[in-house]
Image: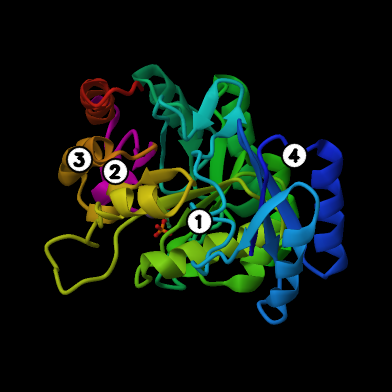
Amino acid sequence: MLVVMQQGASKAEIAEVESLIDGMGYKPHSISGVEQTVIGCIGDERGKTRLQSLETQAGVAHVIPILKPYKLAGTELRKEKTRIEIAPGVVVGDNKIPIMAGPCSVEGLEPICEAAEFVKACGGTMLRGGAYKPRTSPYSFQGLQEDGLKMLAEARERTGLPVVTEVMKESTVDLICKYADVLQVGTRNMQNYDLLKAIGQTRKPVLLKRGMASTISEWLMSAEYIMSQGNMEVILCERGIRTFETATRNTLDLKAVPVLKHETHLPVVVDPSHGTGHWNYVEDMALAAVAAGADGLMIEVHQNPAEAWSDGAQSLNAANFGELVKNVRRVAEAVGRTV
Ligand code: PEP
Ligand code: MN
């Protein structure tokens, strides 16, 4: 349910309503707009009619149901776009479009630092790199794990680029929080609800990739899991879904961008690398993503893609990445944004 306060309701009236909501066993989540405060009441759907009685409370305009199943992620509770500050000057959900780039996997200290240097020189704003890798085959490289996290932290030290890296299981959440600026949830874990809840307990921004066979609604419910635990800083990342089409690794679902703009206040990033699986399709889809309204891009790069330990076929080399950033900038400007 949503308690809409009257314009000009006092702080004391808002606090009183919050405490009554709490007393009824719901978590109050207040959003103060310029003119009005709305309070989302989050909790068990049963017995929600009790909340209706708050309409008689001083300062309350009305109490209305939130119709969508994603209460905190949806636009019923909050219309204003969420801005997530990752580091000073690096914001996701603003007019400026951040570009997260780096290798699929961290392969060593010098390689990750070299990649970070060229990402930065080309205009990239964040460094990505997997230290824990969810591989389809158990015989494939599984990641450098904690050593990889340390290398990412060193690359951040040298370049100033904030780091995004994947968390695969609950038991490593605290460890990864020590090194990362953004926790990535991969496509395979989008519906790992215990992991989502554990990440929701942290206060690190989260990049939540879309499950490869998940609907937009299921994806938003996964964001809701994280937010229900108090972590509101969720960035959605479209990375392609499974369809009958085999010409590309996945089918990048770009209409997800405008649909999400309508359904949620959370920022939306697009990953055309996993979305296509081929380096030579990445730039075109990156440009299309920005034209469609994406709030950021995630791009896999490698100094020598042919030698990459994972996902070399979809990785851009430094020259191609530089070209991508240049052209993304032009499209961003054409749609009233910057890079
Ligand atoms: C990755 O970012 O390297 C990755 C494994 O992504 P996804 O979960 O989208 O496959
Ligand atoms: Mn990858």
Q: Nearer the viewer, mark 3 or mark 4?
A: 4
Amino acid type, callout 1: Gly
Label 4 neighbour load within 10 Å: few <14, some 14-19, many 20+: some
Vertical comparison of 245 with 63: above or below: below
Q: Nearer the viewer, mark 2 or mark 4?
A: 4
Considering only order in the chain, which callout, 1 or 3, is on the residue closer to the N terminus?
A: 1
Q: CA distance from mark 3 to mark 4?
A: 44 Å
Q: Residue at image x 71%, y 34%?
A: 8
Which image quarter holds the N terminus? bottom right
Amino acid type, callout 4: Ala
Q: Is residue 338 left or right of residue 182?
A: left
- Residue marked by disc 4: 9
Q: Nearer the viewer, mark 2 or mark 3?
A: 3
Q: Is mark 4 within 8 Å of ligand 1?
A: no
Q: CA distance from mark 1 to mark 4?
A: 24 Å
- Residue marked by disc 2: 315
Where does residue 58 sit, x and y in percent of width and height? 80, 50
Between 47 and 332, the one lying in front of the other is 47
Please state the extent of the stretch shown in magenta in the rendering: 296-319
Q: Residue at image x 27%, y 25%?
A: 332
Tell me if residue 289 is in the magenta stretch. no
| SS for dot 3 | helix
Considering only order in the chain, which callout, 2 or 1, is on the residue closer to the N terminus?
A: 1
Amino acid type, callout 3: Ala
- Residue marked by disc 1: 74
Tell me if residue 301 is in the magenta stretch. yes
The label shown at residue 288 is: 3
Where does residue 19 sit, x and y in percent of width and height? 87, 56
Where does residue 331 sit, x and y in percent of width and height? 21, 26
Q: CA distance from mark 1 to mark 2?
A: 34 Å
Q: Is residue 308 left or right of residue 152?
A: left
